[in-house]
Image: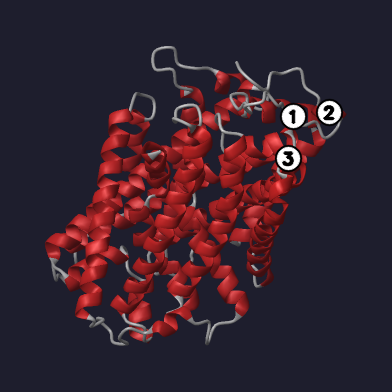
Amino acid sequence: MWGAIGLSLGIVAPSLAMSGNGQGTAAAVGKAVPLIFVLGAIGIALIAHGFFRLTQRYNQAGSAYALVGMTIGPRAGFFSGFGVMVTYLLFAIACLGAVGSFVNAFLANAQGSSLHPFQVPWVYSALGGFVIAAYLVTREFRNVVRLLLAIETIGIISMTILVIVIFAKGGPAHGGGFDFGTFSPKGQSFTVIMGAVVAAFLSWAGFEACASLGEETNNPAKNIPKALLGCVLGTSVLFVVVMFAETVGFGTNAAGVKAFSTSGNSLATLGHTYVGLWFSLILSFTAVMSAFACFLGSAQTTGRLLYAFARDGLGPKQWAELDVKHNQPVKALVSVFALIAVVDYLSFVTGHPIVGTGNAALDEYFYFATVGAMTLMVSYLMVEIGTMVHLVRDRRQLIYEVILPILGAAMIIAVFYFNVKSQTNWIAEPFLAGAIMLIGLVIALAFPGLASKVGIGLSRNLREPEGKEFPASSGHDQSPFPTAEV
């Protein structure tokens, strides 16, 4: 169970989330950042309920796409898998921007009180992380992952110490005191609040990663749901408390909000202010490593999913080849890394996208990560629908719980609606996310046989204890491919 929690915690990357996800939120809603994370925690709890119930039943292996495939059908599983693959690709693109931002924050902290600290173009730092990850991703990196998880643990301990110090000193840098009005929507429109919730959802993205460890975990029907619950509850408390501490730490007046929204690394900035340079450097370093870890994991996951899609007929045959020596889909990974490099380079050269943090690297991170969070929310929506089907069809004794996935689905739809409602730019995050998912939907509808084959292939290691196979929603979903063991 603890290993499963560790995997989810490593993908969620609390140090990265708490160092870089508050700035865009502060720019949008001012001092109401803690309120946004409370709403995000409620939404994630509703979504986690669906994973909790489904992994109690379908507990051998798989993630969102597998659970959707088992409850709704393989074409729906394909659609969810497509969303997950795009999500991790976008996260990988975004995390290189975070690496660039956090490296400059580290350099600025290391130079103390210099008014004009030496900085490097963020694309150079991103390139360094890119090269190291490109090497590691094609080789055995179990020990690297363990090291990165250890660094993440240090980051959590460090941010907890920072919270205690901020609360103990009670003197925010820009005034405002312990303003509990940060949990109030006063002064903010409902549309703006719901639009900002995406940033909060982004912080929990990947919490469901432990659902893929059903075959490696002892007593998975019991321990995987426990791991999901532990990860969500633990990070929910951590994120809300840390975001409150960051908001009052910077100050809740106009100067404080501006300082928060433009910080290259909010934890490191506060660490320097409240503790000292040495503590700020620790927080800066863990943020860099957390962003690198998220990039490494996201890029490899994208490559493996691309390999799985190509293996079942959707994509060039070269992507479906495994390197014999390292047992890795090297050609698929090369394609993924090439696409990431092109997008990040174009972002650096053009100076776009612009989100409003005043930091080009952080803007790049926030934009692509938000698009990824929204495509992932579509997959989460499918899980909520799958949970409804599961409760009505197989768990009649728990039928009253169907209200929870209904509320979860309603919140996801509301967040999308209020994000779209106020947008006028055709490349705004919700429009791009919608266009990407529309491509997956078109493939699922136009090529039902192929979509079914890929959906089953994504989940071919998933087997329900009773040997139950994929439900067939139509004649196209009847497939000769195995749904139990390979």
* Disc 2, SS: helix
Q: Nearer the viewer, residue 416 or 226?
A: 226
Q: Position of residue 357 (x, y in %)?
A: 41, 69
Cα distance in 3D space between marks 2 and 3: 24 Å
Residue drawn where x is 62% and y is 29% of the image? 458
Is residue 212 shown above or below 10? above
User: Counting other residues with Cα less than 10 Å from the Cα at mark 1, is it few (<14), some (14-19), or many (20 or more)?
Assistant: many
Which numbered disc, 2 or 3, marks the residue that appears first in the sequence?
3
Q: Tell me the residue that label 1 is attached to.
A: 452
Is the Cβ of the residue at disc 1 closer than 8 Å to that at disc 2? yes
Residue 170's image quarter?
bottom left
Q: Nearer the viewer, mark 3 or mark 1?
A: 3
User: Counting other residues with Cα less than 10 Å from the Cα at mark 2, is it few (<14), some (14-19), or many (20 or more)?
Assistant: some
Identity, as a three-letter code, of the amino acid under mark 2: His
Q: Nearer the viewer, residue 470 or 229?
A: 229
Q: Position of residue 100 (x, y in %)?
A: 33, 53
Which numbered disc, 3 or 1, marks the residue that appears first in the sequence?
3
* Disc 3, SS: loop
Cα distance in 3D space between marks 3 and 1: 23 Å
Which numbered disc, 1 or 2, marks the residue that appears first in the sequence?
1
Q: Position of residue 93 (x, y in %)?
A: 46, 46
Q: Tell me the residue that label 3 is attached to.
A: 394
Q: Is residue 169 left or right of residue 336?
A: left
Q: Nearer the viewer, mark 2 or mark 3?
A: 3
Spot the residue most to the right: 475
Q: Position of residue 411 (x, y in %)?
A: 64, 63
User: Counting other residues with Cα less than 10 Å from the Cα at mark 3, is it few (<14), some (14-19), or many (20 or more)?
Assistant: few
